[in-house]
Amino acid sequence: MIEFKKVSMQFSDECYAVQSVDLEIQKGEFFVLIGPSGSGKTTTLKMINRLISSTEGEIYIKGQKISEYDMYELRWDIGYVLQQIALFPHMTIEENIAVVPELKQWSRNETNQRVDELMLMVGLDPAMYRHRKPAELSGGQQQRVGVARALAADPEIVLMDEPFSALDPLTREKLQDDLLDLQRRIQKTIVFVTHDMQEAMKLGDRICVMNEGKVVQIGRPEELVQHPANAFVQEFVSGAARHVGHQAFELEILAQPIAHEALLPYEAVSADAPLDEVLSQLAKHEELAVEKNGERIGLVNRQAVIQYLADSPKERGESHE
């Protein structure tokens, strides 16, 4: 579907943002680019829709050089989701989603049907949200609109540049789950940039680890964990590897004691539940009862888990490209 052949992007005689990249992304694949700040992952992504031009080598989409496509048609046919979301603030949600279909001169009826379809697909009720402005939505809701807008013209390829990194952990977890569910249904070719290896492990069919503008290793998540190409990859994936086996964290410490009677209406989670399960449940419920040895020992809420994550040692790079 997408192929890089000896692709480089050179800023100056001695400075490469990307150097001699060879990779192939299959149709329908969720392909993740990851690496520390300055590794070239965002530059690699942006070269696919020619937001940045390569200085050496060739990029192909469906066997055709991207330089042979009309640049505007190329971009209209590739969905793009940014970390900054970048919705048009003066436009309604409906108008934001309809931008590319209107540029492609779809009929009004066809566009309206597509807007409704996409809003439902990303979990936003059209009757409630289509006439609102972006400022009236939460960050997570705005990012859902960003995903809907990227899918509006039914592109085969969707590029996603750290789309969830600015969101709180619980919202990010929920959107990751929803994106995986959406991908199972629509089977787009997704190229996703992140600096968070745990996110990459969760989402990616394959992961491309980059460093200093070069591809270090490409493989399935379990391959990177079990067979890292070198010490750099081993160190980069080590934090996320601890979560692959669903290692438990100490939820009991976060539970606030409360009278047993008051716990009855709450959904419950085991005190030894792994972090990903707790996050998934808290995406659906504001508070959870914590159970140990068959008894409910306390309550845990979103704020407590967010604080726990904020206070925990970071297991990912903190800089952005």
Image (tube, rainbow, N blue to C red):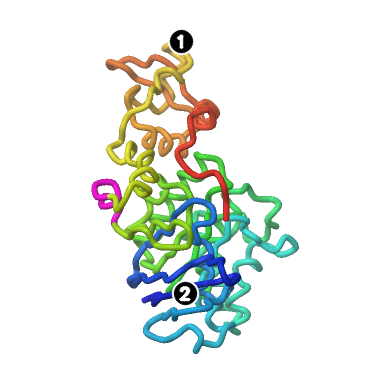
Vertical side of 21 occupied by 294: above or below: above
Q: Amino acid at mark 1?
A: Ala
> Which mark, residue 43?
none
Q: Residues within 10 Å of mark 2 (few under 14, many from 20)?
A: some
Start-end of magenta stretch:
220-227
Residue position marked by numbered label 2 in the rendering: 155
Does the magenta run of residues contain 199? no
Q: Earlier in the sequence, mark 1 or mark 2?
A: 2
Would you say the magenta stretch is mainly helix, strand or loop?
helix
Where residue 237 appears, as percent x and y from the top left, is 36, 45
Image-based side of 83 in relation to 299, left or right? right
Q: Quadrant of the N terminus?
A: bottom left
Residue displayed at 49% across by 57% down: 39
Q: Residue furthest top?
A: 259
Residue position marked by numbered label 1 in the rendering: 259
* Pair 1/2: label in front: 2
Q: Is residue 305 visible?
A: yes
Cα separation between marks 1 and 2 = 53 Å
Image-based side of 85 in relation to 31, left or right? right
Q: Is residue 116 visible?
A: no
Name the secondary structure under disc 1: loop
